[in-house]
Image (tube, rainbow, N blue to C red):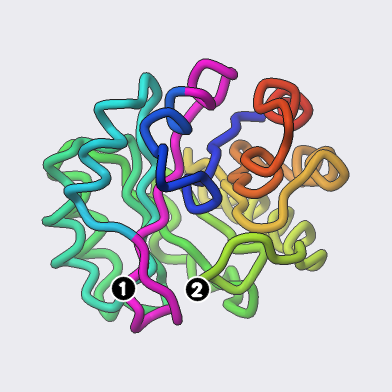
């Protein structure tokens, strides 16, 4: 299992240190939550702050857009060359076009589904995707409880990936900890995002290692 600490739960007063600390502790990606206050009831950070995150990080960035104007935000963050840019299927009228745009910029394209969004909506774009991000909490805030039904959803997404001969990875974000990560691994999940589980722990390295099942 690969691990992407979410900086949403980090101490923003010492953000560069927090990013370097989880990189040194063995994470695989740095997960960056971008919220616009419209698609979700919270606002986070823009490209100026994320540029500083990129400089502090020795690991690739995983940028998760929780916004309404996806194309605008893709153009804002693409110059930082993250590994992934993820947008929400619920907020995009033309997902296939946006997937192709992201890929044309040399960035891997991912789509996120809210907990109540059915995975069948991926049927006609799954072969074009590099990753599917399943929200296991309602997006907007860190520290929420894991929604158990997402484990079964991950299994169905894995079946769809195999059936469609897609190479897409599966990522799960929200409430992930050392108690549920093994079930997620068995369900076919490749990457977990963890915020408060890592950043609220006393030992980042130990917390990250406990997720690498």
Mark 2 packing: few (<14 Cα in 10 Å), some, or many (20+)?
few
Q: Residue furthest front?
A: 13
Q: Residue furthest right?
A: 179
34 within the magenta span: yes
Question: Could you tell whether 113 is left or right of 82 in the image?
Answer: right
Where residue 186 sits, quadrant-wise, is: top right
Dot 1: what SS?
loop
Question: Could you tell whether 63 is left or right of 27 in the image?
Answer: left
Dot 2: what SS?
helix
> Nearest the camera: 156 or 202?
202
- Magenta part of the protein: which range? 21-44
Residue 2, image x, y percentages: 60, 29
Q: In which quarter of the image is the C terminus?
A: top right
Label 1 or label 2, whichever comes before in sequence order:
1
> Nearest the camera: 35 or 13?
13
The image shows residue 140, relative to residue 168, as above or below, that is below
Where residue 124 sits, quadrant-wise, is: bottom left
Question: Could you tell whether 97 is left or right of 137 in the image?
Answer: left
Do we see residue 162 in this rendering?
no
> Nearest the camera: 195 or 176?
195
Q: Going 56% across and 49% down the picture, which residue do you hit?
A: 161
Q: Going 40% across and 45% down the picture, which residue do you hit?
A: 13
Do we see residue 126 in this rendering?
yes
The image shows residue 16, relative to residue 12, as above or below, that is above
Residue under numbered circle 2: 121
Residue 168, image x, y percentages: 48, 43
Residue under numbered circle 1: 36
Mark 1 packing: few (<14 Cα in 10 Å), some, or many (20+)?
some
Residue 104, image x, y percentages: 14, 44
Residue 41, image x, y percentages: 45, 81
Residue 2's label in the rendered image is none
Distance from label 1 to label 2 (Cα)?
24 Å
């Amino acid at each position: 299992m690969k691990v992407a600490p979410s900086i949403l739960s980090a101490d923003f007063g010492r953000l560069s240190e927090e990013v370097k600390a989880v990189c040194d502790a063995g994470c695989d990606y740095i997960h960056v939550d971008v919220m616009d206050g419209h698609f979700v009831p919270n606002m986070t950070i823009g490209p100026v702050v994320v540029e500083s995150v990129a400089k502090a990080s020795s690991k690739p960035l995983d940028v998760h857009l929780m916004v309404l104007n996806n194309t605008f935000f893709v153009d804002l963050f693409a110059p930082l060359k993250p590994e992934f840019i993820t947008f929400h299927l619920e907020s995009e009228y033309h997902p296939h076009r946006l997937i192709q745009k992201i890929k044309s910029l040399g960035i891997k394209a991912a789509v996120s589904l809210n907990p109540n969004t059915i995975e069948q909506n991926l049927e006609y774009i799954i072969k074009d995707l590099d990753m599917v991000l399943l929200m296991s909490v309602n997006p907007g805030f860190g520290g929420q409880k894991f929604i158990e039904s997402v484990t079964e959803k991950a299994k169905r997404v894995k079946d769809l990936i195999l059936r469609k001969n897609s190479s897409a990875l599966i990522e799960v974000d929200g409430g992930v900890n050392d108690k549920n990560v093994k079930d997620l691994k068995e369900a076919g999940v490749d990457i977990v995002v963890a915020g408060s589980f890592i950043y609220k722990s006393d030992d980042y390295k130990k917390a990250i290692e406990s997720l690498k099942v």
